[in-house]
Amino acid sequence: MTDFLFILYPWIKSLHIMAVISWMAGLFYLPRLYVYHVENAGSVEGASAIFVTMELKLLHVIMRPAMIVSWVCGLILVLTPGIVDWSYVWPWTKGASVIAMTWFHYWLSLRRKDFTAGRNQLTGRQFRMMNEVPTILMVIIVISVVVKF
């Protein structure tokens, strides 16, 4: 099994990186869509329904599959012997940040449900501020993996 994981390692790592890029793109874009939804949907007839459709497709067609592939490939990489030295701090900071990013993904999903139900309570400014969360988590993850402190 170990030999098999070593053979697949560069392919799994490549797939992991591609999935993370896709997931991150969605995590950056969805809060921006929410800003536009809050600030502009009321000014054009039918715009709210268009925003809801765009948000739903981004979440279900791009973000969710990318998150799942990121997690599956990441776990395979972690299980590959010799790849992660758990005596360092970096795997723990990366893991905590990935869990926080997953929580943020689901928080965004709940906000979409609020829009669909017509009960959004957040302003465009608040969504702009929340748009910084994935950036902070990305910085922690990249520094953790590259510097390996």
Image (spheres, grey):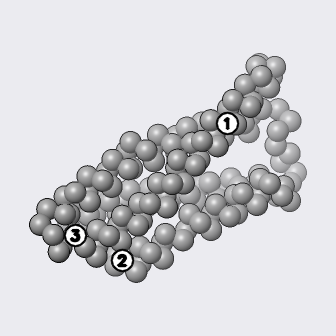
Q: Quadrant of residue 144?
A: bottom right
Q: Position of residue 40 (x, y in %)?
A: 25, 73
Q: Position of residue 6 (x, y in %)?
A: 80, 26
Q: Secondary structure at mark 2?
A: helix
Please state, as top left, top right, bottom left or bottom right, where the N terminus lies in the image.
top right
> What residue did someone put label 1 on?
14
> Up-down: is 19 above or below 134?
above
> What residue did someone put label 3 on?
41
Please state, as top left, top right, bottom left or bottom right, where the C terminus lies in the image.
bottom right
Q: Secondary structure at mark 1?
A: helix
Q: Secondary structure at mark 3?
A: helix
- Residue shown at 45%/47% (left/top)? 63
- Residue shown at 51%/54% (left/top)? 25
Q: Which amino acid type is shown beneath numbered disc 2? A: Gly
> Up-down: is 134 above or below 82?
below
Category of crowding for the residue at label 1, using alpha-carbon neighbours closer than 10 angstroms: few (below 14), some (14–19), many (at least 20)? few
- Disc number placed over residue 60 in the picture, else none: none
> What residue did someone put label 2 on?
124
Closer to the camera in the image, 94 or 40: 40
**Side of 44 relative to 3 (left or right):** left
- Residue shown at 26%/57% (left/top)? 52
**Side of 2 relative to 130 (left or right):** right
Q: Extreme front residue here?
A: 44
Q: Which amino acid type is shown beneath numbered disc 1? A: Ser
Distance CA(mark 3)–CA(mark 2):
12 Å
Q: Position of residue 122 (x, y in %)?
A: 34, 76
Category of crowding for the residue at label 3, using alpha-carbon neighbours closer than 10 angstroms: few (below 14), some (14–19), many (at least 20)? some
- Residue shown at 41%/78% (left/top)? 126
Q: If you read the primary sequence from the N terminus, does the residue marked by circle 3 or circle 2 appear first?
A: 3
Q: If you read the primary sequence from the N terminus, does the residue marked by circle 2 or circle 1 appear first?
A: 1
Q: If you read the primary sequence from the N terminus, does the residue marked by circle 1 or circle 3 appear first?
A: 1
